Amino acid sequence: MTPYNSIFNWSGGKDSSLALHAILKDERYQVTQLLTSVNSVHDRISMHGVRRALLEQQAKSIGLPLNILSLPEQPGMSEYNDLMSEKMTSLREEGNTHSVFGDIFLEDLRTYREDQLKSAGFEAVFPIWKRDTTELIYEFIEQGFKTITVCVKGDLLDKSFAGRIIDEQFVKDLPENVDPCGENGEFHTFTFDGPIYNHPIPFEIGETVFRAYKAPKNEKDICGISNEKNPDKMGFWFCDLIPSI
């Protein structure tokens, strides 16, 4: 059987790393490239806030081409869908037929992705779908992946959680209402070493800052997580990572 040419939707974090590790071992799929959304204003990964230079180093260490979807700052869903549709049409013309994600259990998000991809002639693939998130995070650690939190949701986690390496103690320190994998948007990470990398990504820890944003209207909005304390705003602690080379 000829494997399906597939793009991998790469965020740079732990769930992406686990899902990529799984799909690379699946003979049904051939990953042709990584696709990442980048804020064109700040030149950083959308939502995660990681510098593009570090993203590029990840792709180089993994050994896969990097394809960038440039987005304006805080695009509306209509604008996002148009830009993504244009990108997917181009990728389909290159012979790609499947699009891989690291989502775990957000049903609405999966349905949204599947509906959007179907119109572009793609099939969505979810290698770690419905896995127990506690098991997943310990599997991630045991397999030798190394990751650091770069963004944490301010009304759920305090500043001390930003810029922490995820290890067993980190998982134990999480409040009970926070998913161990941050699947509800509680925290985002940058993975800098592990079995999918040919070499670790060097970086230094920079400043940690708090930023507030207008809350999305619904959970299908880009990286949208509702804020029960203040439905009009949501805030995040961002830990800046600075490339060492």
Image (cartoon, helix red, strand yellow):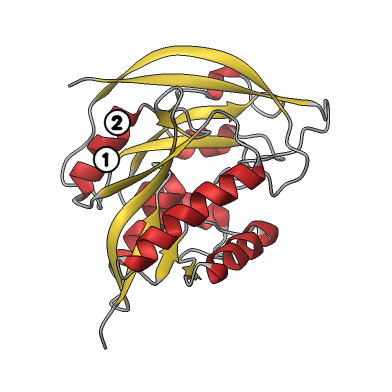
Residue 222 location, quadrant: top right
Q: CA distance from mark 1 to mark 2?
A: 6 Å
| Quadrant (top left, top right, bottom left, bottom right) of the C terminus | top left
Residue at the spot of label 2: 54
Image position, residue 179 (x, y; %): 63, 45
79 vs 240, left or right, is: right
Image position, residue 142 (x, y; %): 35, 51
Circles 1 and 2: CB atoms closer than 8 Å: yes
**Residue at (38, 13) in percent of width and height:** 206
The relative height of residue 40 versus residue 95 in the rendered view (above or below) is above
**Residue at (25, 84) in percent of width and height:** 2
* Residue 104: mark in rendering: none
The reply to whether residue 184 is in sight is no
Q: Residues within 10 Å of mark 1 (few under 14, many from 20)?
A: many
Mark 1 falls on what kind of element?
Answer: helix
The reply to whether residue 69 is in sight is yes
Residue at the spot of label 1: 58
Image position, residue 200 (x, y; %): 21, 37
Nearer the observer, 54 or 78: 78
The relative height of residue 102 versus residue 182 in the rendered view (above or below) is below
131 vs 9, left or right, is: right
